[in-house]
Image: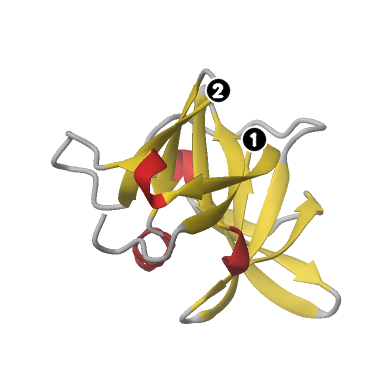
């Protein structure tokens, strides 16, 4: 993996539908329960977080894997991006794991512009996302 450097990648694992995904934990500011989301249209809305309006992306819609249905496990992960702070709506947040570069394999699928690679953790296959590309889309 040419764009994953170092020996360890601290990864937060979250769920969208039946799939497990991961992003670099150092990009995560906080994880919150879903407050009222205003102006939600298609994949994007806004939440008021301590007086700041934070854009929120619905990753299930963005990845064409269905529509989000809010449950008691639904969360918004507040992330740092090159354009500022943004939230992503996910079905559930599971855990923080440490992956080594050797744990992450390139994906054989060629149309995965948002994916850095895949890793196996226990019995689960985790898709490691390229956060900058996901948020730029």
* Local SS, label 1: loop
Image side of residue 72 versus residue 132, left or right: right
Q: Residue at x 45, y 59 (%)?
A: 7
Numbered-mark total = 2
* Local SS, label 2: loop
Image location of residue 80, percent across then percent down: 58, 73
Q: Which mark is residue 8?
A: none
Q: Is residue 137 above or below residue 35?
A: below
Q: Nearer the viewer, mark 1 or mark 2?
A: 2
Image side of residue 23 versus residue 51, left or right: left
Residue at label 1?
Answer: 91
Image location of residue 61, percent across then percent down: 45, 41
Which of pointers 1 and 2 lies earlier in the amino acid sequence?
Answer: 1
- Characterize the local packing of mark 1: few (<14), some (14-19) or many (20 or more) Cα atoms within 10 angstroms: many
Image side of residue 127 versus residue 47, left or right: left
User: Viewer-proximal residue, 81 or 65?
Assistant: 81
Quarter containing the C terminus: bottom left
Quarter containing the N terminus: bottom left
Q: Is residue 118 above or below residue 25?
A: above
Residue at label 2?
Answer: 122
């Amino acid at each position: 993996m040419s764009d994953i450097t170092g020996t360890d990648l601290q990864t937060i694992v979250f769920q969208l539908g039946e799939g497990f995904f991961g992003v670099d934990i150092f990009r995560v500011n906080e994880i919150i329960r879903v407050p009222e989301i205003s102006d939600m249209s298609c994949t994007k809305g806004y939440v008021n977080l301590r007086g700041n309006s934070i854009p929120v992306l619905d990753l299930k819609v963005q990845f064409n894997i269905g529509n989000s249905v809010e449950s008691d496990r639904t969360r918004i992960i507040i992330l740092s991006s090159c354009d500022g702070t943004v939230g992503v709506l996910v079905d559930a947040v599971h855990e923080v794991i440490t992956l080594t570069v050797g744990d992450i394999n390139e994906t054989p699928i060629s149309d995965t512009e948002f994916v850095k690679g895949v890793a196996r953790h226990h019995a689960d296959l985790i898709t490691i996302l390229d956060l900058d590309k996901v948020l730029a889309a």
